[in-house]
Image (cartoon, rainbow, N blue to C red):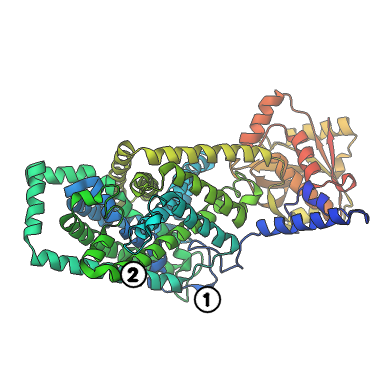
Amino acid sequence: MGVSFPAVNNAERATGAAPSENNESALQDRRTRSSFRAWMLAETAEPPGEQTGPHAIPTTNRRAHWLRVMCLTGLDYFSTLGYQPAIAALAAGLVAPIATIVLVLLTLAGALPVYRRVAEESPHGTGSISMLARLLPRWRGKLAILILLGFAATDFMITMTLSAADATEHLIDNPFAPEALRGQEVVITLALLAGLGVVFLRGFREAIRLATVLVAVFLLLNLVVIVVSAGHLIGNPIVVTDWWGALTTQHGNPLMVVAIALVVFPKLALGLSGFETGVAVMPQIRGDATDTEEKPTGRIRGAKRLLFTAAITMSLFLMASSIVTVTLIPQEAFQPGGEAYGRALAYLAHDFLGDGFGTAYDLVTIAILWFAGASAMAGLLNLVPRYLPHYGMAPAWARATRPLVLVFTGVAFAITIIFQASVDAQGGAYATGVLVLMTSAAVAVTLSAWRKKQRGATIGFGIVTAVFLYTTVANMIERPDGLRIAAVFIVGIVAVSLISRVARSTELRATSVRLDATATSFIADRPVLHLVAHEPKDCSRERYVTKLRHARNAHALDCDEAIFIEVQVIDSSDFEGELLVRGEERDGFRVLVTQGSTAPNAIAAVLLHLQQSGHDTHVYFRWTEDNPIANLMRFFFLGEGEVAPMTREILREAEPEVTRRPWVHVA
């Protein structure tokens, strides 16, 4: 037996009341508000299988080959070529090529093995966050998720604002751009972000086909620029000699150069940005015909190929672009206001291939940067509803797309204004979000290997975790902006989560209720049910006898008619889920047993299910003796405490009609 409980509140029920015939204008206003509300709270702008962003779960016939899906990752990962070489040169100076080699080694020897393991253990697109949620249960896991969501929000939000800001740089620094655009960086960036918000409000279908073409053209143009620039280096080897001479003169012997590179390479961490997205797009990958959701072997194999190919491709581009930009572009051009600021490869495209090719490069770069912002928005729209509302840590409307689009667009506006659309100023914040997520992934796979007693893997991943921790801490110390932004997000998420958890404490929390065969036999042919609430800490015969004696004395209950109901609180940090009610015979007593996150909500859900199934249902409690405030805190955090009054309140909110509620007796 089973029934699902729709999340309908009293206000929604009230809007269904028929207005008077004399109030046509009020009726029209109500219809308008209802239509707008329905549009705003639509679950998603697209039908199932065509949902927003690379993180949505597609239907089987919409999955694609891993090489094409890699282009979705490339929107975030490869698009950093638009600004990464310039940021690296500005942050590390002449040491940038050596520091980039260190970054590439970390990519191939550290990040790639970690995320190949994440792909294997979390193949459904939930990434390292869900791995930590499984490895760190109860409130510890939820708190870890809230903190990681704060850094993930930093990552995705700064991806949006940084990409839009760099697109603005490519626009205004183009020689054909009107002079009036200069000095309007903030306005232009806000306009790009507003356009992004409007597109998502209308409904955005992210096409793999478009991403494939855009990424392919972008990489091809970058390859042309790098090859032509390398030709200039080969034809003028004195340029490389001058760079190396200046480097050793400035920093001493080669060993000192390497030491400095190890210190400054965390500033280049933007080049690691694509791995989290790489595992997030896994549901888009077409696997084998024999794949199942429990064991998607082909999808995992495709994801590993995707990660390897993307890492090798980006590593080659990073090293080559760093060498040609640092050696061929004057250092002063990388400074704010310089011609290569935020657009080093575009500078070389204009300088060596002419303004026509350079303009084409700018347009493609602007397009992929804007599309990277769209990918980041899609990531947020899939990440937040996946966790917070499910944990009861966000309002129910946070499951819908459009309200979140308005929230995220407003936050992006604020970040852009605070940073004045500066590419360099946002680089540290972006790197912080990327590095924390990668560190969490390294921690997750290390814990997983340790629990599986894989000694070699535990040591190897432990070393990688230590390197990522150093990189993260060094970046935070050098550029604390990312930590400040993440702290704001974390505090906001935790505050909203606590408020929402308290505000939603009287919801049923049951997505459905099912009774097994034994439980069904207990209630069969009984028009009236008498249930005695019992705490399952003591299930001895003496305790059941005492409980029945109290029910008989306090309520004049016929003991032959009584059925006990027990809720085993497994994890009070969970919020909602299906309730399976089992029937058990214990020492001659009939007991309905279920598991839930809180006792009052589970009891209320079962009672309401029985009442709606045609039984006149009564439940019997006895008052608790502890302090009411302490009991209330136990209810919020442990799922126990004030069971009787909270059960009654939950039923009152779930069923507004008094005559249709189960009876609650307390003595």
> Viewer-nearest of labels 2 and 1?
2
Residue 353, which numbered label? none
Q: Nearer the viewer, residue 169 or 622?
A: 169
Q: Residues within 10 Å of mark 2 (few under 14, many from 20)?
A: some
Q: Residues within 10 Å of mark 1 (few under 14, many from 20)?
A: few
Corner quadrant of residue 64: bottom left
Query: What residue is rendered at 58% in x and 41% in y?
Result: 573
Circle 1: residue type: Asn
Relative to 281, is 559 on the left or the right?
right
Q: Secondary structure at mark 2?
A: helix
Residue 61, which numbered label? 1
Query: What residue is rendered at 58% in x and 64% in y?
Result: 203
Q: Are marks 2 and 1 in contact (CB under 8 Å)?
A: no
Q: Which residue is mark 2?
A: 360
Residue 480 visible (yes or no):
yes
**Vertical arrangement, residue 456 with respect to residue 547, above or below:** below
Q: Nearer the viewer, residue 404 or 620?
A: 404
Residue 369 lies, in percent from the top left, at 40, 60
Image quarter where the C terminus lies is top right
Gap in angstroms between the C-alphas marked 2 and 1 = 35 Å
Question: In this figure, what is the number of numbered marks?
Answer: 2
Relative to 300, is 42 on the left or the right?
right
Q: Secondary structure at mark 1?
A: helix
Residue 455 lies, in percent from the top left, at 30, 49
The earlier-in-sequence mark between 2 and 1 is: 1
Corner quadrant of residue 555: top right
Query: What residue is rendered at 23% in x and 60% in y?
Result: 321
Residue 117 visible (yes or no):
no
Circle 2: residue type: Ala
**Vertical arrangement, residue 282 with respect to residue 652, above or below:** below
Query: What residue is rendered at 87% in x and 52% in y?
Result: 526
Residue 362 lies, in percent from the top left, at 34, 64
